[in-house]
Image (spheres, coloured by chain):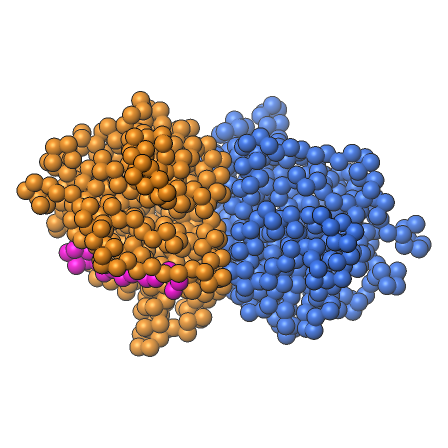
Chain colours: A blue, B orange
Amino acid sequence: MSKIPHRLYLTEEQIPRQWYNIRADMKEQPDPLINPATMKPAAEEDLYPVFCEKLAHQEMDAATRYVDIPEEILDIYKVYRPSPLIRAYNLERELGTPAKIYYKFEGNNTSGSHKLNSAVAQAYYAKEQGLKGLTTETGAGQWGTALAEACSYFGLPLTVFMVKVSYQQKPFRKAVMETFGANVIASPSDTTAVGRKILSENPNTGGSLGCAISEAVERAVTTEGYRYVLGSVLNQVLLHQSIIGLETKAAMDQLGEYPDVVIGCAGGGSNLGGLMAPYIQDKLTGKGNPRIVAVEPASCPSLTRGKYAYDFCDTGKITPMAKMYTLGSGFIPSPNHAGGLRYHGMSPILSKLYHDGYMEAVSAEQTRVFEQAVRFARVETILPAPESAHAIYTAIQEALKCKESGEAKTILFGLTGTGYFDMMAYSSYLEKTMSDHIPSDAELQIGFDSLPKIPGIQE
Amino acid sequence: MSKIPHRLYLTEEQIPRQWYNIRADMKEQPDPLINPATMKPAAEEDLYPVFCEKLAHQEMDAATRYVDIPEEILDIYKVYRPSPLIRAYNLERELGTPAKIYYKFEGNNTSGSHKLNSAVAQAYYAKEQGLKGLTTETGAGQWGTALAEACSYFGLPLTVFMVKVSYQQKPFRKAVMETFGANVIASPSDTTAVGRKILSENPNTGGSLGCAISEAVERAVTTEGYRYVLGSVLNQVLLHQSIIGLETKAAMDQLGEYPDVVIGCAGGGSNLGGLMAPYIQDKLTGKGNPRIVAVEPASCPSLTRGKYAYDFCDTGKITPMAKMYTLGSGFIPSPNHAGGLRYHGMSPILSKLYHDGYMEAVSAEQTRVFEQAVRFARVETILPAPESAHAIYTAIQEALKCKESGEAKTILFGLTGTGYFDMMAYSSYLEKTMSDHIPSDAELQIGFDSLPKIPGIQE
């Protein structure tokens, strides 16, 4: 056991040269996107006004198993990757568990999270197509920060619509994005038609990711040479994030380890989708059968309490509709929910795999999550993002079950990022002013009532 | 050239097992500490009321060349070390320089800076002695954060006196320390005699490091079972920080590289003292002769405009007196100075080496420093702390000189940490409200007038 180091870094040569596309091994594909203009399945070309062409292709391409990572993207990956695989010796000792706990830490880059993996790819393809700029949305701010970094690297203008409640609570997140040259606008704003409409209906709204997406898409399609990019949910994002899992598996293989359980927080699904990629491949191809567990906040429980249905990806209902676990685009999570993981839907790939029994899902209340986050920080000396702390919480539960049963299971979880910009949330936890909100069935029904009707498909 | 990776991580086995003590190779020693009670050189025992015994011994021990790092300290080093040595390919391309630029990045741990290297050591020795708690001061907050992490790991209570201007400007720094269980007090405070005295003389003061040191020392010596710890300046701190340089040299050796110039920011000297340690050894023992350059803020220019004189380490004049480059303990840097590097004095070891011609020193104005920090962040994707950016600024100057001369020099600098908690400073730079302050000779004279008189030694 002492042979296994605390941190294992692969070498630069061991950085994967290809992303892995889960869909190529899925026995059943996720249902197709529906174009709201035609109420028919969307074609790749239908996405060109919104996404740049290579990304639209990646979005629709279920057949290509491995996609070459362009050298220009690898050149940036090499600046901050491989990320470390950490053996949580200190946490194991703290818990007194016989379990072996590993985590893949994606917080060691300035953006502070795994989001940079896809931001770099999306900014690169946009630049390659000769676009003039990009738009996006950000909630907790990690995606916006990552994309601002990537765009500044490629010299590409960026406009970020930031969920208003985050914009107000996290002025320093905004400042980081501005340092990287981004234009940051609080959403809903009066700079778009959809923003003005939402403001007129609810002037005091703190905004939502779904609303910010609507504004970002509108701005992209109405600005010459601009396209929209999204940091989670999409198939293309899971493709890029597969680098997390591929590196993890290479490192675990090097150690002679294989996880009994793979745990990741799940908001839109980008981190878990990336971390689990090679392990889901094992399950789909019969080469291995680890448990895969998605952890979501009890206040925004799309997998555990949502419906598997077609829904819009945004509040303004201008994006294509996707079949996914969703709380309805009209669902707005409680404002006392800290951090990210507040999206109403879930990656269609994850949703399908969950629906087909390849994954489990659990939810956790935030005060319990922060309790374990502080415990983790004090022994592992990494202050986790609230999102990441959901995975920590569940990993600790699993490790404590091992303590009871005496089993020395191998637990792997994704530590997506650091909590430097979430100190208000930590303070409210420490001052005991943080509360939990579990939506009632009636509250959820409001969201479900917003689900679209699609003739012949979803009545 | 393409064989050299972007980031080189040594393996866990390559983490140095010993610290290096520069004094063992110095031809002339720094002048001894003077005990203000006796006006005579202080003995090791004189320090016991303030420092724990092992640290007092390290402070006074100039003879032992290599000091074994206890296993318990290595166990934490392994959680976040080795830190990467990064080849700044992107920055080289941005500058169009033939120079090879390397930096040792110490920001990849939650404390966000190199300060953790000494915090872990100091907390360990305090715990080993059976102490009940520690006190310290923090300015920009990096040291306080690092020590809070280390103390929470060892289960040791900690009280941090935080310079009031930072306390007010950086509420999230305070929250991080509190998350790690520290008690944080704005300094000057009414909780100490020296704090009350300073407040009565200047009720509106924003505080200073020297003042916070006085409060922390008073609290330590008046609280049963408590001792005081300091994050820079001291010989013991340079000893612990030598791990930075030892790792750097091991990595550079592995690459077959040797620096022509070694650059570090210098406030109290802990980072540069650590980074340069094995290279100064080469200079002292005739094995190599790289230039060593300290970079300090123009607003707090202890090396470039200070006096080499005995001075108190604190404003309240209760600490031993050290011979060092100093602006006088009465010097208070301009409140518009952002970040750390605002200490009136300088490590006695660095001061002596500078005095004896082994080091150079330059100063830089903060607007120019931030200009290069933003430039660096955009290509290297690391948002540097303002302190670290001083080294970036000078490294870029050196690289641009190489561009003019066509020389392919090897430039090494220390990137001490990340700027996540300095976004107010970045914002003020971006909004062009940041200004520079170069103290006038008359302003400096106020500080010099506070220098102590020591019969027979300094009249």
Q: Position of residue A367 (x, y in %)?
A: 62, 32
Image: B222 above or below A14: above
Q: Image height check: is A368 above or below A245? A: above
Residue A213 is left or right of residue B287, and the answer is right
Q: Quadrant of the N terminus of chain B?
A: bottom left
Give the image location of residue A273, x and y in percent: 67, 49
Q: Write down the quadrant of residue B400 in the picture.
A: bottom left
- Pick the residue in front: B58 or A162: A162
Residue B363 in the image: above or below residue B74:
below
User: What residue is drawn where x is 54% and y is 64%?
Assistant: A181
How many numbered marks have been drawn onto this rendered protein structure? 0
Most extreme residue toward the left is B456
- Is residue A239 something that shows in the picture? no
Q: Is residue A139 at least partly visible in the picture?
A: yes
Q: Residue at x 35, y 56 (%)?
A: B414
The residue lying at 55 percent from left, 69 percent from top is A155
| x and y percentages locating residue B191 in the rendered image | 36, 30
Locate residue A256: give its quadrant.
Answer: top right
The percent coordinates of residue B11 (x first, y second) are 41, 48
Q: Is residue B351 magenta?
A: yes
Instruction: Please give the range of residues in magenta.
Output: B347-368
Residue A429 left/right relative to A3 = right
Q: Of residues B182 and B283, which is closer to you in this image? A: B182
Using the image as rendered, state which of residue B453 and residue A336 is in the foreground.
Answer: B453
Residue depicted at x 24% and y 42%: B313
